Image (tube, rainbow, N blue to C red):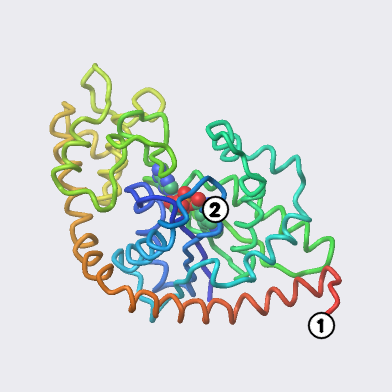
Amino acid sequence: MTRVFSGIQPSGDLHLGNYLGALRRFVDDQHEHDSVFCIVDLHALTLPHDAAALPGKTLEAAAMYLAAGLDPEVCTLFVQSQVHEHAELAWLMECNAAYGELSRMTQFKDKSARGEFVSAGLFTYPALMAADILLYDTDRVPVGDDQRQHLEFARDVAERFNSRFGPTFVVPEAAIPTVAARVMDLQNPTNKMSKSVSSPQGTVLMLDAPKDIEKKIKRAVTDTDNEVRFDIEAKPGVSNLLGVLSAATGEPPEKLAERYDQYGPLKADTAAAVIELLRPVQERYAELIADEAELRRILAAGADKAQAIASVTMARARSAVGLLPR
Ligand code: TYM
């Protein structure tokens, strides 16, 4: 059976981009593949963070995964730092990653340009991500388009490691959706919707109240010619709305565009579709987040299942590079 692995950072509130680009797709994957999903809290340490808030954010991310429809009896759901092999394999990845290739990562360039303190962890972030994936003999990694370069890196390191030390890792493939692979900021539609850039009016959060979702989508920046056409280059704002509506309804964006000759109705329909899409998730979330003990129990059981796989791969990797067993 194909193994699927993916992860989401608990670094901020999850948004519509995380849901359409990744989370929603995990729900289908769990029934078709052997699926492992992770809350990557070690990655959340790469930027300045609020230590007191992180445990709560981690539980919130877990509740959101479950509210979206992940079933812990069907897939494996766990917290990265609770399976120590992630940090351990990351070191072997770092020792097989070239300084030059890490320097070329666009996410590193963007994030380091914004921050005052650029940690070494931010620089080696893709090596930890490669470790996450390779520990589970992953075939397929469902992610949004912004993770494409990190996935290429994971493949390159896996291939390099295998050629240096003999076959050790499965070389993973990225699975990037055809629509909503890059949901854009509603106020600045040439930037992606993001947890780490503050744009409250441009970001639809998973837990936004319906009236706020409506307000944000109705005020989305478009352009002035009032022509509804799916053309990402020339009409990024309108195309973003069509992409979101397409992801919510399952109809191709080009076909949806034919139905509108003004922006107002397109915005109203997109807002209504997003509100309906998120409503059941929000309802389930409210129940799940109220039971912290149960969330912790699910995560502990998930960490046991994950570690049973990760420890085997880790032992293989240790032996491949020549570390002396205790
Ligand atoms: P993160 O936490 O930034 O995002 C989680 C997932 O959401 C997708 N995504 C988007 N998709 C569409 N439009 C957007 N605007 C948008 N913003 C985010 C991301 O592509 C991702 O799939 N490095 C990863 C986390 C990670 C990981 C891994 C992923 C760590 N280890 C191993 C897969 C496999 C990240 O920061 O995602």
Q: Name the residue under label 2.
A: 45
- The secondary structure type at the circle numbered 2 is helix
Mark 1 within 8 Å of ligand 1, using the beta carbon: no
Q: Of all residues shown, which one is farthest toward the front?
A: 52
* 109 with respect to 51 (left or right): right
Residue 229 at x, y percent in the picture:
28, 28
Other residues around mark 1 within 10 Å, as few (<14) / some (14–19) / many (≥20): few
* 255 with respect to 4 (left or right): left
Toward the viewer: 54 or 9?
54
Q: Distance between the residues labelled 2 and 1?
A: 30 Å
Examine the image and state in which quarter residue 81 appears.
bottom right
Toward the viewer: 237 or 123?
123
Residue 187 at x, y percent in the picture:
31, 29
Residue at position x 36%, y 47% in the image: 17
Give amino acid for label 1: Arg
Is residue 184 among the parts visible in the rendering? yes
Nearer-N-terminus badge (2/1):
2
Give amino acid for label 2: Leu
Residue at position x 38%, y 30% in the image: 232
Position of the C terminus, as image quadrant, is bottom right
Which disc, if any, is residue 326? 1
* 152 with respect to 111 (left or right): right
Q: Is residue 244 above or below residue 283?
A: above
Q: In this view, does 130 lie above or below 226?
A: below
Toward the viewer: 22 or 110?
110
Which disc, if any, is residue 226? none
Residue 20 at x, y percent in the picture:
35, 51
